[in-house]
């Protein structure tokens, strides 16, 4: 893993634009040749509570508000992808001023003598995972507001771990790290209640159903009292092709009951679950060339669905049904979880 080569402009990286002083967070691993798929995150605002290079910035959280902002002020950062059958946010290569990467951030902080509290805690958590989790130094990095110099005193710690085998092996060590460290731990019940308020976000999922998945997740917790979140990125050789190899066709929305038959990719971003459908609950499918048993997987780019279910679990899932083509041939159907309010996966 010492020679791990990761291209710039993938999940976890941030992009600063040349002319507009905007910051976007990159989503996904596969991108068009001329642009990076990424979503607006920090915008200049005189009333913003973050400052960088004498510019005040505000963070936009809600996905719909991010689209509304670009439509009103910067429509050039919106484009329709025929491959994904979706309007997306993106920055063309020519409009990129700088790409910030988590591994660069960790290396730079390791060299500095004077750093902020959140920078120091982020660096210390990386070092703990390197020492106790046996992660190679070039396979871990710091992302989020800390990486781009827009963190606040109460910001979270956001880390990325790179490499398929490194990630899977480290995930198995996390429980023992929680046991030996008195500063790094999982959430307690009161913290799950606080976590529930913003994680569920108006989707009407009960606290009891929320806990069914959340209490088993190891990629989040507290370090010195600060929330931390981990994302795992597969090795490039496991990305299965390029952006143009895949095509997705929107078939409408569907709700099904299914059994998880493979959850190995549940820790990664994007996450994936192989499923065996049990029955259809409801749908508004647009086409008639579809059988429920053709649904082979559940996918999501949202961190809230990582580690959400395990092998053998039965789940109720509601989301966008897509027909998947690989190299112009029909491959299977999938359910994509992308909407904060409408989309759900609940352990039964």
Image (tube, rainbow, N blue to C red):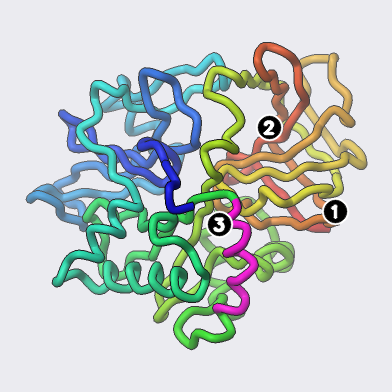
Tell me, yes or no, whether the highlighted magenta stretch contains residue 168: yes
- Whole-number angstrom distance, CA of label 2 to CA of label 3: 31 Å
In this orientation, which residue lies closer to the viewer: 341 or 263? 263
Q: Mark 3 points at which residue?
A: 166
Q: Name the residue under label 2.
A: 320
Left/right placement of residue 253 relative to residue 129 reads: right
Tell me, yes or no, whether the highlighted magenta stretch contains residue 324: no
Judged by depth in the image, the label closer to the viewer, 1 or 3, is 3
- Whole-number angstrom distance, CA of label 1 to CA of label 2: 19 Å
In this orientation, which residue lies closer to the viewer: 258 or 164? 164
Q: Is the magenta stretch mostly helix, strand or loop?
A: helix
Check disc 1 and report its element: helix, strand or loop. strand
Check disc 3 and report its element: helix, strand or loop. helix
Judged by depth in the image, the label closer to the viewer, 2 or 3, is 3
Q: Sequence-wise, which precedes: disc 1 or disc 3?
A: 3
Q: In this view, does 7 lie above or below 124?
A: above
Residue 314 is marked as 1
Q: Sequence-wise, which precedes: disc 2 or disc 3?
A: 3
Percent position of residue 197, x then y: 54, 63
Name the residue at 80% across, 30% down: 283
Left/right placement of residue 59 relative to residue 44 reads: right
Name the residue at 76% across, 22% down: 331
Left/right placement of residue 94 relative to residue 329 reads: left
Q: Give the range drawn in magenta.
A: 165-177
- Whole-number angstrom distance, CA of label 1 to CA of label 3: 28 Å
Q: Sequence-wise, which precedes: disc 1 or disc 2?
A: 1
Percent position of residue 287, x then y: 79, 15
- Quadrant assignment for the C terminus: bottom right
Name the residue at 19% across, 45% down: 45
Residue at the far left in the pictured view: 54
């Amino acid at each position: 893993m010492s020679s791990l080569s990761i291209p710039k402009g993938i999940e976890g990286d941030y992009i600063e634009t040349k002319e507009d002083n905007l910051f976007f967070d990159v989503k996904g691993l596969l991108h068009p040749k001329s642009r990076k798929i990424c979503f607006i995150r920090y915008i200049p605002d005189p009333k913003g509570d973050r400052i960088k290079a004498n510019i005040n910035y505000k963070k936009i959280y809600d996905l719909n508000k991010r689209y509304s902002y670009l439509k009103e002020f910067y429509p050039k950062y919106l484009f329709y992808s025929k491959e994904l059958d979706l309007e997306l946010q993106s920055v063309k290569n020519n409009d990129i001023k700088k790409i910030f990467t988590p591994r660069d951030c960790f290396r730079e902080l390791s060299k500095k003598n004077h750093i902020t509290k959140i920078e120091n805690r982020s660096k210390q958590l990386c070092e703990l995972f390197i020492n106790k989790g046996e992660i190679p130094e070039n396979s871990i990095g710091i992302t989020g507001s800390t990486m781009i110099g827009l963190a606040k005193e109460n910001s979270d710690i956001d880390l990325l771990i790179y490499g398929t085998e490194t990630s899977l092996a480290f995930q198995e060590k996390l429980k023992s790290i929680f046991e030996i460290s008195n500063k790094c731990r999982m959430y307690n019940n009161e913290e799950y209640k606080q976590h529930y308020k913003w994680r569920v976000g108006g989707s009407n999922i009960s606290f009891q159903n929320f806990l069914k998945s959340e209490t088993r997740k190891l990629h989040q917790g507290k370090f010195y009292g600060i929330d931390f979140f981990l994302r795992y990125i597969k090795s490039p050789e496991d990305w299965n092709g390029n952006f143009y190899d895949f095509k997705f066709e929107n078939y409408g929305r569907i709700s099904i009951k299914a059994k998880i038959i493979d959850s190995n990719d549940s820790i990664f971003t994007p996450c994936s679950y192989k499923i065996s459908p049990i029955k259809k609950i409801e749908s508004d499918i647009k086409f008639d060339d579809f059988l429920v048993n053709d649904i082979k997987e559940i996918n999501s780019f949202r961190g809230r669905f990582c580690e959400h279910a395990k092998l053998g679990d039965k789940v109720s899932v509601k989301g966008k049904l897509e027909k998947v083509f690989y190299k112009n041939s029909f491959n299977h159907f999938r359910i994509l979880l992308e909407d904060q309010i409408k989309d759900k996966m609940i352990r039964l």
